[in-house]
Image (tube, rainbow, N blue to C red):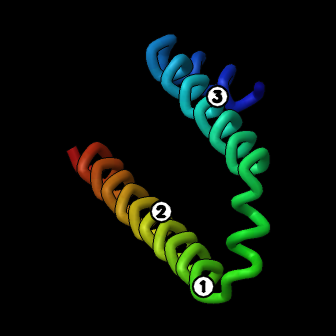
Amino acid sequence: MALIIDNATRLGKKNAFTNILGLCTATYAHGAFSILDVSALILNNKTLFLLVKLMGSCYLLYMGFKSIKSGIHSLNSKEKNINE
């Protein structure tokens, strides 16, 4: 709830609704996977479990690099504003 309010105040209604849509989609997908017992299938299959872990770690690395790149870009733009 706090994330949605934060996005709505900083980024506007459109981004808040996008956030809500993403959260609802993830909740329904997780519920469907639970009903279909996909979690047990993944845990019992070592190769599939390794694949899920690798995909998760690649996603975290991507998000980390994206965050670092965004921070560097933000610092560079602040330096330009100070120098002007």
Name the residue rendered at 36%, 63% in the picture: 69
Tell me the distance, in whole angstroms, between the alpha carbons under discs 1 and 2.
20 Å
Residue type highlighted by circle 1: Leu
Against 50, is 55 above or below?
above
Q: Earlier in the sequence, mark 3 or mark 2?
A: 3
**Quarter where residue 10 is shown:** top right
In this rendering, position of residue 46 left or right of residue 67: right
Q: Amino acid at mark 2?
A: Met
Residue 50: which disc? 1
**From what the image shows, is residue 55 above or below residue 20?**
below
Instruction: Estimate the x, y position of residue 74 in percent, counting from the top left.
Output: 37, 52
Amino acid type, callout 3: Cys
Q: Residue at x 74, y 40 (%)?
A: 31
Which is nearer the eye, 55 or 9?
55
Question: What residue is drawn where x is 69% and y is 31%?
Answer: 3
The N terminus: image quadrant: top right
Circle 1/circle 3 CB separation < 8 Å: no
Under circle 2, the secondary element is helix
Q: CA distance from mark 1 to mark 3?
A: 27 Å
Q: Which residue has dot 2 on it?
A: 63
Q: Which residue is mark 3?
A: 24
